[in-house]
Amino acid sequence: MQYFADVLLPLALGKPYTYAVTSNEYAILKPGFRVAVSFGKSKVYTAVVVKLHNQAPKRYTPKFIELILEESPSVTIKQLKFWYWLSNYYQSKLGHILRAALPATFLLESETVVIKKEISDQKKSTLKDDEFLIYEALDVKALSIKEITEILGKKSVLGLLQEMFSQGVVDIHQKLDEKYKPKLVSYVRLSQLILKTKNLEEVFDLLKNASRQKKLLMGIFEQNPKGNEWKNSKELLKKTSSTSDVLRTLISKGIIEEQTIREDRSLYNYKKQHQKRQLSEAQHKAFKEITKAYEEKSVVLFQGVTGSGKTEVYMELIARSISEGEQILYLLPEISLTPQMVERLQGSFGEEVTVYHSKFSVHERKEVWKNILENNAKAKIIVGTRSALFLPFHRLGLVIVDEEHELSYKQFDPSPRYHARDSAIVLAKIHQSKVLLGSATPSLESSFNRISGKYGWVQLNERFGKVALPEIVTVDLKLAHKKKQVKGGFSQTLILEMEKTLAMEKQIILFQNQRGFAPLIECLDCGHMPHCHQCDVTLTFHQFTDQLKCHYCGYQIAVPKKCHACGLTNLTTKGMGTQQIEEQVAALFPEVEVARMDWDTTRGKWAFDKLINSFATQKVKILVGTQMIIKGLDFQNVHLVGVLNADHLMNFPDFRAHERTFQMLSQVAGRAGRKKMRGKVLIQTYQPHHPIIRQVIQGNYDQMLKQQLEDRKEYHYPPYNRLIRIEVNHSDMETAKKASQWIVNLLLQSWDGHILGPVFPPIARVRNRYRMQILVKIGADQSRGRVKQIIKRTLEHFESIAVFRSCKVNLDVDPY
Ligand code: ADP
Ligand code: ZN
């Protein structure tokens, strides 16, 4: 009898490869085991076993695997199932999914770089010969695994290196983490040993003649009579005007104990754990309804207005799940939101909360992975961004997708191009667990699914504390310009409201969408933007060709010299950015502290938290920002929210522009007046009577939904039709055009469906490659599986054509 293992390699391969194994290995191995295999001429890779069998491949003689890398599998059967689904649904290569799913240390391969760690002489003496040889060689410089293999003259060193890594002798170097150095923060409290063995008087007695030490110690007891809560050392030193020498002395005397933790890991005081919050009546009702809905549906859409306290309801559900011994996955759209949410969750669940996202170091990822795989008490509630879907859940009971409508749940590049919300639902199905989709402004897809009865639906229409939703008013920019009541981006009305708010000692958020930078042509006199005559979208400005183009049908015109609507020549090509807005605010209110939050100002690792802090502590009075500021942030003192120009949102060339406008404006409005006093929102726009603006003002989600669904149906867009985008790129524009046209022609031969394009996307050239896009629209009555098959076959055929060899093709299923 012969023995074989099919393994997944972390390469752009579409299917598993078969390797031979010995009967001994066959007896040990199970799907999910990591093994080292050689592939190609001399390269060694870590691969994951997916199947064991006795069928010799017909076309080739398989090589033997090199090594089994572990004693028990790192990957679960359920994960494998999930990966196969992703690969099939999103048409991405299994190898790409493997890369996205496993922490880099799990995927040692020839190119991985190994660096040495400083270890004690004693530890050095315990190294085995081979290990010592490697360690010595690493003294000179970091080495790739390939180089190490050559030094040792062995075929596979992965097992050895894995062992050295586990023992903390070497580090695995991954490009992503190159620059990542976590900052450590020190926290101190009264030594718990002292607390147990001596009484406080005795302690102070010890310090009779050390007034500076005594003063510092007093600081520890401030608002903390027992001294058992951790305090930030830096703040403590500042408050008590002490020096760090004094603190060191107290630590060395054993009176104070210290703990350093990473800045992004909040250390929390276990004391606080028990102040459990009481759900309001409305929240309790929602909680009951959700649990009831789960009796019939496994997915529930939880639609709660901004400030209704959805998080409190989530926590109640989490508590219920925990008591059943289940794991909970809590998905957030952005890394920047995790610290706040983790703090809130830790307040109730303490150590059971763990975090996972792509900025984690390789060590941390591995640690979290293990904890979850082993179902440790430390990993019951996993808070993370979309990559957390790939963790080896053991007993997943509940998945919460917070702000489910957020665009950032979609991964655009690289492959796998998946949607985390949709994938979460499939993951939950594999685990037979429940899903809660939370949002104040659900995506059209999710609302569509609850209308059709696929999802349960629970609403929470009352803000916590019964604070009224803010009053929303518009400022007609066209009129204001006419009356010459506009200064830079600010109407008189907005300036007046800002003055009033500042006089009340309240804070202001000014929202300017990033999409203001979308290359559009706008008339400064009337606000007109040229539209496509065949589609309901704005034409996009292409600097490269000096043209305006429609991204849906390909219609194009030369950039006009004067406005088509009013005939004047005051045309401009860009919207106003946050930076200009910030400068104008500074000029209008020179004595007030302003800050700006956008991609530029939050690039540093902690920049986001610092900004949030300076606004939360009210040092900053006016915050200017892009959509970053609207996501789930909870500031208490914001009275006024100003939207500088809503038109850029509405006119964005995308079929979701109106839906997204409604979502963004409602969310940004939701930042106003969250405590006690009713807030105010001012929307500046050239189209104050636009239905979307009216719907935002009235908070009429249902009407927005109804109207948008009608439009989507009429124009064959999701959720009625499904979209697949094929992108072809090549360094030569003509080749890219020809290749994409070739694909369209071939597709149309086997399918009589709806295909748009090929067209150039707004940014036609990226890294010197020209891109062409094809949009395939699949009707509700057409088989998605069949269309995917046709596309797959077409692309396989395409790859075999010599002149198109150097073309790259990307596939994006549900590219929105
Ligand atoms: P949402 O996410 O629905 O916009 P949040 O969960 O951020 O709302 O809650 C809004 C505010 O109300 C927060 O400051 C929160 O701390 C507070 N809050 C909500 N529910 C409760 C409760 N049951 N007890 C105390 N405070 C609450
Ligand atoms: Zn068009």
Image (cartoon, helix red, strand yellow):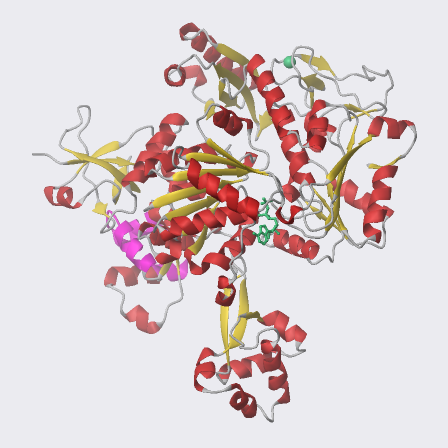
Q: Residue at x 50, y 67 (%)?
A: 271
Which quadrant holds residue 224? bottom right
Q: Does the magenta stretch mainly form a helix, a strand or a loop?
A: helix
Q: Total label count?
A: 0
* Residue 13 position in % (x across, y down): 34, 30
Does residue 339 lie above or below 711 as drawn?
below
Q: Residue at x 87, y 43 (%)?
A: 496
Residue farthest left in this picture: 1
In the visual, does 798 lie left or right of 543? left
User: Which contiguous range is marked in magenta?
Assistant: 137-166
Q: Residue at x 45, y 47 (%)?
A: 317
> Does the image show residue 740?
yes
Q: Is residue 147 magenta?
A: yes
Q: Residue at x 65, y 35 (%)?
A: 664
Q: Is residue 58 magenta?
A: no
* Residue 728 position in % (x across, y down): 50, 21
Does residue 667 lie above or below 788 as drawn?
below
> Does the image show residue 577?
no
Q: In which quadrant is the N terminus drawn?
A: top left
> Which residue is at the front of the view, 251 or 144?
251
In the visual, does 479 lie left or right of 293? right
Which quadrant holds residue 127? bottom left
